Image: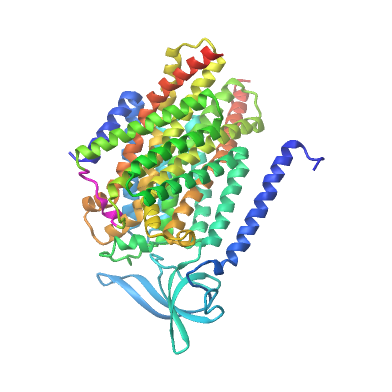
Amino acid sequence: MRFLHKKWRGASIVAVSFIVIFTGLLVFTQHNQSFYEDPIAEVKETTVVDEAEQTIDGEAVDTVYTQEIEAILKNGEHIGETITLINDYADSGVYHPEFTEGDQLFVTYDQTDNELTGDVIHVKRDHQLVWLSGLFLLVLIAVGKRRGVLAGVSLMVNILIISYALDVYIATQNISLLVIMSVAVVLMTAFSLLLISGFTYQTYAAITATILGTFSLMAITLSVLLLTDYQGLRFEEMDFLTRPPQAVFMAGVLIGALGAVMDVAVTIASTLFSLADKNRNISNRDLKQSGLEVGKDIMGTMTNILFFAYVSGAIPALLVYFSNGAPLGFTLSMNLSLELTRALAGGIGIVLTIPISLYTTIYFINRKRVSV
Amino acid sequence: MNALMILTLILFGLMVAIGGMKGLRSFIALFINFFVILLMTLMMIDQNANPVYLALAACVVISAVTLFFINESNVKTKTAFLATVLTTLLLVIFIQFMVEFVMVGGFSDEEVEGLTIYNFYVGINFVQVMASVVMMSTIGAVVDEAISISSPMYEIHRHHPDMSVKELFDSGMRIGRDLLGTSANTLFFAFFGGYLALLVRFKDFSYSFGQMLNAKVFSAEMVTILAAGIGVALIVPVTSILTAYILVRQQHKNKESTR
């Protein structure tokens, strides 16, 4: 590849490895049934055998169809055999979808009189997820180039850190989840911010501000929750946990706000450092003033990000409650109390991080001035 | 007093103390946006309403509140608004395709567990509801990026009024690229925080990697994360091209009128 410009060589290596990896994954997820322990069947033919109208107060609102599915098992001891499955789906798609030829499903089966019958557990989605991840990376890299690749890498590494931290939590039992997640927070902050701006004073300022900001948000939220004895928080939606939901919830608050806090710290640190680079004699007072202006500008939109990311998830449950005539106050407190707490705690973290990163950044700017 | 009220008061106090009038406006905007979501949800109950159209309308109102109420109405916020609306329209096509392709519409077994006393067949199309949820989760970040790109582009144009559309567009893309990583991170961590309980459950019941990956609730969250990533990436070129075009055209108009 001598004829290629150095810049293009890097790009073509990324492009080629991208295509190879994703083609490989797509082919693999199409043929990986034998790697699964649970039985998988591919839909061949479907017939609707029954349909029932769903009514509320005598008014038809939805239709539920029962479809009989002929499918071929793709793994296990009955591989290649035909199985008959039953699936209920509604026009509204509220629970199971309608299945069509080619869909691959995880199933359970019973054998009676040489005939296999069974139920659908859920859809095999790994192949589709690979397609979407490919699309996601493609858009990210097309727009962000090197930055897009880094965003993808950072996402994957952070998932691994969180996943490993949870493994440690489950394996040890006696270390508090909050302690483990605090360590994870420090690791993820350092990793993500070093990836963005390298080993510079600006990065150190952002890391310090993020860690201080996250832990102050933690201290405030935790003391409010403990002082009020979690009054107003409905943990019912976390009933599926086999452990105390409070600890898991607080760890979620900590992780959830981390990205936003990092964003604020990076924005302020990079603004102040570029001001200080342009004008070496700029006073601490002027730096503080400019930083505060930037902080005011981003405060509103940043708190909005967390607010929407959390509250939107509750919409489907809200719809079911409302449609069943549940009272407004009860519905909101059952479905939104945890989401709103997350958003509020995150907002407190965002706003607190503004002054915190102002002072830490000015401290690091002065250190840099002394050292240069 | 319950915990939520105290936290609300603390947030209010901090926003006003640090942000002054702008902080106050930002706090009020949060409240307005809450009522917009609530109103949208109440309107979705009507079986004849299309959830996706309602969510699109809500996104338009929300970006208007965030841009014009917290900031003010000027070229920067107007182009950011236009870019947000365009990106939302583009994104909704992606999202609807994604939700149907991975078949993650409606509720999962895990979610149904907690709702058993209620009737689910209420005539609302939950595949479209799911698409609306994904879009609404991303709108905050999309608006944030739009204004963070259009505002410095405006400053660059003010200092160098002779830059061409192409040059302005390139500088917009550079700014956007720098923002991309942190914006994506903000959303990713927000979602992880929300899903942590679910991950603990998966680990507790020792789901295999394959079982977890194919579970509806996990896939739905993957779709949300991937769609959010696509959203914060798409807004970058859309804002850059719109802002560059509008600023340069305005410049030409001004020149002609002074001649």
Name the spot of residue A311 as percent of width and height, x first: 35, 47
Determine which quarter of the picture holds residue A216: top left
Type of colouring: rainbow
Which region is colored magenta? A230-239
Q: Quadrant of residue B254?
A: top right
Quadrant in the picture for the C terminus of chain A: top right
Asked if the magenta segment contains residue A232, the reply would be: yes
Q: Taking B115 as reference, is A223 above or below it?
A: above
Number of numbered tags placed on the structure image: 0
Q: Position of residue B70 (x, y in %)?
A: 38, 31
Residue B71 visible in image: no
What is the residue that sits farthest to the top in this orientation?
A281
Q: Quadrant of residue A22?
A: bottom right
Q: Position of residue A282 (x, y in %)?
A: 50, 12
Residue at the far bottom in the pictured view: A113
Q: What's the residue at 34%, 60% (across, down)?
A: B111
**Residue beneath the point at 41% across and 66% down:** A93
Residue B5 left/right relative to A51: left
Residue B207 in picture, x, y percent from top left: 43, 60
The answer to whether residue A239 shows anywhere in this view is: yes
Farthest right residue in view: A3
Question: Which quarter of the image is occupied by the N terminus of chain A?
Answer: top right
Front one among B107 and A190:
A190
Residue at position x 42%, y 17% from top? Answer: A288
On screen, residue A289 above or below A206: above
> Which secondary structure dominates the residues rendered in magenta?
loop
Q: Is residue A179 magenta?
A: no
B46 left or right, relative to A185: left
